Amino acid sequence: MALEEVISAINSNLLLNISIILLVATVIAVLAKLLKQPSILAYIITGIILGPLFLKITGPSETIKLFSEIGIAFLLFIVGLSLNFSTLKKTGKTSIIMGVFQIIITTIFGFLLSKALGFSNITSIYISLAITFSSTIIIIKLLSDKNEIDTLYGKILVGLLLVQDFVAIISLIFITSIGNENFNINSAVIIFIKGLSFILLVFISSKYLLKKLFNIVSSSQELLFIASIAWCFLLSSIAYLLGLSLEIGAFLAGVSLTVIPFNHVILNKVKPLRDFFIVIFFVNLGIGMLLSSVSKIIIPALIISIFVIVGKFLILLIIMAIIGYKKRTNFLSSLAIVQISEFSLILINLGLRAGHLTQDIVTLITIVGLITITISSYLIINNDKLYILMSKYLSIFERKKLKEERYKIENNKYDVILFGGHRTGYNIIKSLQNTKKKFLTIDFNPDVISNLKKLGIEAIYGDVSDIDFIEEILRTKPKIVISTIHNLEDNLEIMRLYKKYNKKGTVIVTTKDLVELKTLYEKGADFVILPELLSGQKIADYLRHLNKTQIRKWGKYYYKSIVKEIKAGLI
């Protein structure tokens, strides 16, 4: 009885309720971090633990639901504020084509699978859309941690995810607008007219009002923050009154603020607020899971999860093979998308709110999310090891005529092979240009390669994780190999392969870690670059050999040189 009274007290007190949720969410999020799992999983599990399934400490409430809706609104506000079509332009038409075909094919197969599992047409449409989208937050976070966001496959994924996010937002807007209405052509026309009028109103406001208004408040970051939140809430309210949805208003509020030069300041200010409310959304999702329905939907959830992991992987793998990418690029890109998105969970939740779905379907997709996000996180972290294991079986997914450049090394001889042509690498390139040494630069960032080629520097795209490619390069027995890459495993592999073909050659590698420095020397490195140490030694040389006037003069020259190289995309 005492326990029931405590639970009742917690449920009746909002502050206690939120405190318990945040405390448990923090503990589980720390555990998730240790297990290298995304925090989204931790928040859903928090809801499952605290909700009716286990401890029954908290349950669904109108206030928690309201916080969840605010979380979705802030998420879409930030998506709109972060929208950058120049990113899509950089990734080219290929990402758009892949994104569109991946969405269409996955949706069709997802719909057929859902129908085969006995779901209705409307439920099957929701399920197929939900499993089509992949998590931008999880993929970008894991690629950034692995320093692979600027690789070819990283850039392809960024473009593909942008296409997915755009379609996801359109889906969310459409669903929240039709609500419980008996949808027909007339209601579609009314929604279209209302939506178009609202977009026009926002566009006019953005062009003629917002810049002036935000210029006035920009002198104070506090005012800037309040004004941006007020603008988000104002448009959300107008959209709601027009019968559209507050999510449309929030998204368009974000898009309209992209014209402001300090929109990045607003972005950084609003993100913590979004993070708080979105935590409540995912916790509420876990709270809403029904124990009674789990036994009934676990088999469909497992089947759909297998389709998400295996089906989406094969669909993108085949699309990329047809376009003409190498098997490694195909494999790494396809392996990254084998989970559902945070937008998938929001989509299903909005479907429940609109009266199109039951709580059972929300529980089903939540289980699919838990399974696929957990498995995909480990797959992305270990993608290089998995590629090595599966490489020989992937040749059928590589066309003879490739879109990617295949460098013919053959009889080419080089004095120096340089891995990494950006920043540290470019300074080495400038030095090598003043010698008569023939050198080749290899980098995993296509933009770096493009910029170097514009300067007439021999450079090719390549990833040091691709063992076959690196071995082909080092088989030419260059006199010197230099790596500006900070990854210990990659540097050790470069050293091993180089010494295999040229035991007398010189190998120079880079690290930021003193323990790794010792390991690299023990494994045979001739010189290990420690950037921070070399920087200190360089400054010490300036102080020894230059006076105050000379240091200032050199500083100005150094600054101009850096600005010029930044503009050229070289550092």
Image (cartoon, grey):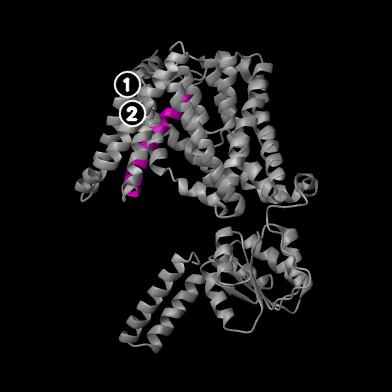
Label 1: how many Cα within 10 Å (few below 14, some 14–19, many 20+)? some
Residue 201 appears in the picture as rendered: yes
Question: Would residue 353 appear left or right of 16 to someone viewing this image?
Answer: right
In the rendered image, which quarter contains the N terminus?
top left
Corner quadrant of residue 178: top left
Q: Which residue is mark 1?
A: 242
The percent position of residue 92, horizontal first and vertical second, equals 56, 49
**Dots 1 and 2: beta carbons under 8 Å?**
yes
Reply yes or no: does residue 536 show up in magenta.
no
Label annotation for residue 198? 2
- Disc 2 residue crowd, few under 14, some 14–19, many 20+, Cα 10 Å: many
| Residue 281 point in image, percent of width and height | 42, 28
Sooner in the amino-acid sequence: mark 1 or mark 2: 2
Q: Is residue 280 magenta?
A: yes
In magenta, the rendered stretch is 264-286
Task: Give the CA separation, mark 1 to mark 2.
Answer: 9 Å
Q: Secondary structure at mark 2?
A: helix
Residue 504 percent coordinates (x, y): 74, 79
Task: Tell whether 280 sits left or right of 118.
Answer: left
Q: Which secondary structure lies at badge 1?
A: loop
